[in-house]
Structure formats: structure tokens, C-alpha cells
Image: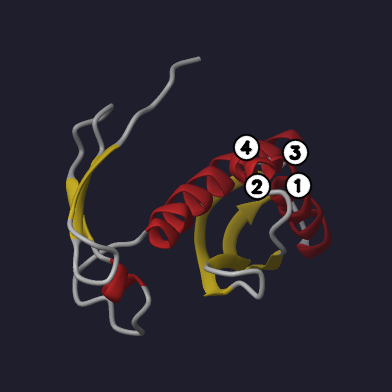
Amino acid sequence: MPTRSARTAWQGTLGEGAGRVELTSSGAGAFDVSFPRRAADDAQGVTSPEELIAAAHSSCYAMQLSALVAEAGGTPGSLDVTADVTLRPDPAGGFRITGIALKVRGSVDGLDEAGFAAAAQAAKATCPVSKALTGTEITLDAALA
């Protein structure tokens, strides 16, 4: 399996500096980052590590759930997955990711609500990004659409 890479070029201090994250493996894009925008409610077009983690988690989870639905005898028509990653001050100093809320709505043939819920829970436990984020509370809201 391949290794994927990203690069960040940063200039200045935490509070006044800014950077640019480049998805170097795929060349799919480059995105501005800044701590003030990271910590603000309105990102104003600037991404953050938390948003990039949310993108990684939602896409990984969707892939894993698709595989597990098929293993359970179902056929996924569509899966709409969101991941909300929360950043909060850490009592020990600095900041930390305090939780990730996954939400999935699926259109699936061949599985009832219970079968879909079981596959959804299994996907939460087994997707590689979930595994990488152990130590962070991950919640799941899963239902058929």
C-alpha cells in the first residue's frame, strides 16, 4: 500500500502567521491555513487540520461502510457521511480534538434498519482513520434515508 504525503509551508508566528497546505501525493489542491481562522467560528475560506481530519474520516468511513454493507448482503446505493471534528482548549495546555461526530444517511438495498445500523457501527470501529484516532471520542448517528 502507498504512503500519501502533504506539505505545509508556514510563515510567521502562531497568532499572526499563516501557511499553505499542499496535497502533494495527488496534486489535488493547496489550501490556506491560519491559527486565528482555525480557532474562529467563521473559517472565512481557510481550512484547518480539523477540517482535513473531518474530510479524511468521512471519506474513509464511507468506503468502509460500503464494504461492510456488501459483506452483510446489502447493496449500497448512496451514503451521505459527515464528520464534525471539535477543537477545544486542553486543560493540560494548548488545544486538543475533543470529539468527532459521524453522521450517515444511507440508501441501501437488501438490509433493514438493524442490519444497516450494525454495519455502520462496525465501520466506525474498523475504518483506518477511526483506528488512527483512538483516544478521541467518536460518536455515530446512522440511519437509512
Determine which of the numbered discs, if any, sits on residue 111 in the image.
Answer: none
List x then y, in percent, for residue 97.
57, 64
Q: Amino acid at mark 3?
A: Gly
Q: Is residue 13 above or below residue 87?
A: above
List x then y, in percent, for residue 16.
19, 70
Q: Amino acid at mark 4?
A: Pro
Q: Are marks 4 and 3 in contact (CB under 8 Å)?
A: no
Question: CA separation, marks 1 and 4?
Answer: 9 Å
Determine which of the numbered discs, if any, sits on residue 128 in the image.
Answer: 4
Q: Secondary structure at mark 1?
A: helix
Determine which of the numbered discs, if any, sits on residue 73 in the image.
Answer: 3
Give 73 or 133, whichever is nearer the viewer: 133
Question: Could one spot residue 103 in this view of the protein?
Answer: no
Q: Tell me: 25 left or right of 55.
A: left
Give the mark nearest the N terminus, 3 or 2: 3
Question: CA separation, marks 2 and 1?
Answer: 6 Å
Give 18 or 47, whichever is nearer the viewer: 18
Q: Secondary structure at mark 2?
A: helix
Determine which of the numbered discs, if any, sits on residue 130 in the image.
Answer: 2
Q: Which residue is mark 1?
A: 125
Q: Amino acid at mark 1?
A: Ala
Q: Are marks 4 and 2 in contact (CB under 8 Å)?
A: yes
Question: CA separation, marks 3 and 1?
Answer: 19 Å
Question: CA separation, marks 4 and 2?
Answer: 5 Å
The nearer-to-camera label among 4 and 3 is 4
Q: Secondary structure at mark 3?
A: loop
Q: Are marks 1 and 4 in contact (CB under 8 Å)?
A: no
Q: Are marks 2 and 1 in contact (CB under 8 Å)?
A: yes
The nearer-to-camera label among 3 and 2 is 2
